[in-house]
Image: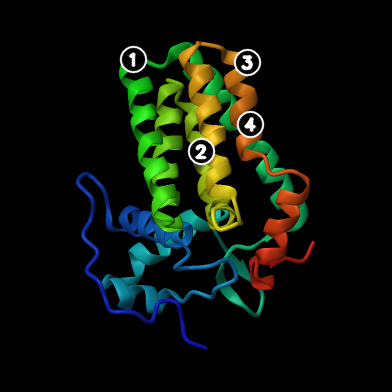
Amino acid sequence: MKSPLEEADEDLNPEPGGTLSQTLRARLETMIAEGTLRPGDRLDEFELAQRFKISRTPVREAVKALVATGLLEVRPRQGLIVATISIPVLLEMFQMMAALEGLCAKLAARRATAQERAGLKAIHARLVEALADGDPESFYDVNTEFHELLYDSAHTQFIAAQTRALRRRVAAYRRRVTYQPGRMATTIGEHQRILDAIERADAEAAFKAASEHVNLLGDDMADLIAALPATMLEES
């Protein structure tokens, strides 16, 4: 089976103020979120070092950090893999994600600046354009921008950091939600309710709209689970 790392080599240059291991960690997080590396895929430190033209030391450091966050795991007889999630835990993660997103929206309704509110509306307009284009990948990327600005608009540190960490953890699964029939159109309406609540400074309505937007229930969750490859799910 072809390794997910068997692509053209790329030079990995540290971000300003960062290290090679931090840069590699961010790159691997992106590859997992984008689906280049999927849950269940096996990784090899030597292949990573070759792919990114770096030594084994920053690779080991990056891998250790990603294992600590739960994005990678080491299994007996399998070695290093992109972590999978069992269905019960995935359900819990979506429920927690809904609570955190709701809290961010609630705080944004109370704290967002006029510039941030305008920014959310501008991103939403781009999301409407992505829907018209019928491009799920573009839609997902713009949608991520919307949620990132929502977290910023809450003006928190710990809560926003925890929300982002959990979103990264379930990103490979959330991306697949975008491909569910009718989901992109539904997202537009749900985002509009969040925007309306923030514009009215209605914190409780913002919490409800954002948490319902993220928390897949009933048939929606069943449809997502049915669409997931078995390799992405851990046996509970």
Task: Give the amino acid at mark 3.
Answer: Glu
Image mark for residue 114: 1
**Taking the image as drawn, is residue 76 in sight?**
yes
Who comes first in sequence, dot 4 or dot 2?
A: 2
> Residue 163 versus residue 59: which sits nearer the camera?
163
Give the spatial CA distance, label 2 vs label 3.
20 Å
Give the spatial CA distance, label 3 vs label 4.
11 Å
Q: Is residue 115 left or right of residue 136?
A: left
Q: Nearer the viewer, mark 4 or mark 2?
A: 2
- Circle 1 residues within 10 Å: few <14, some 14–19, many ≥20: few
Who comes first in sequence, dot 2 or dot 3?
A: 2
Image mark for residue 204: 3
Who comes first in sequence, dot 3 or dot 4?
A: 3
Q: Which residue matches tag 2? A: 188
Q: Which residue matches tag 4? A: 211
Image mark for residue 217: none
Q: How many marks?
A: 4
Give the spatial CA distance, label 3 vs label 1.
19 Å
> Residue 209 versus residue 4: which sits nearer the camera?
209
Q: Residue furthest bottom?
A: 1
Secondary structure found at label 3: helix
* Marks 4 & 2, CB-CB < 8 Å contact: no
Task: Give the amino acid at mark 1.
Answer: Ala
Give the spatial CA distance, label 4 vs label 1.
23 Å
Q: Residue at x 49, y 56 (%)?
A: 66
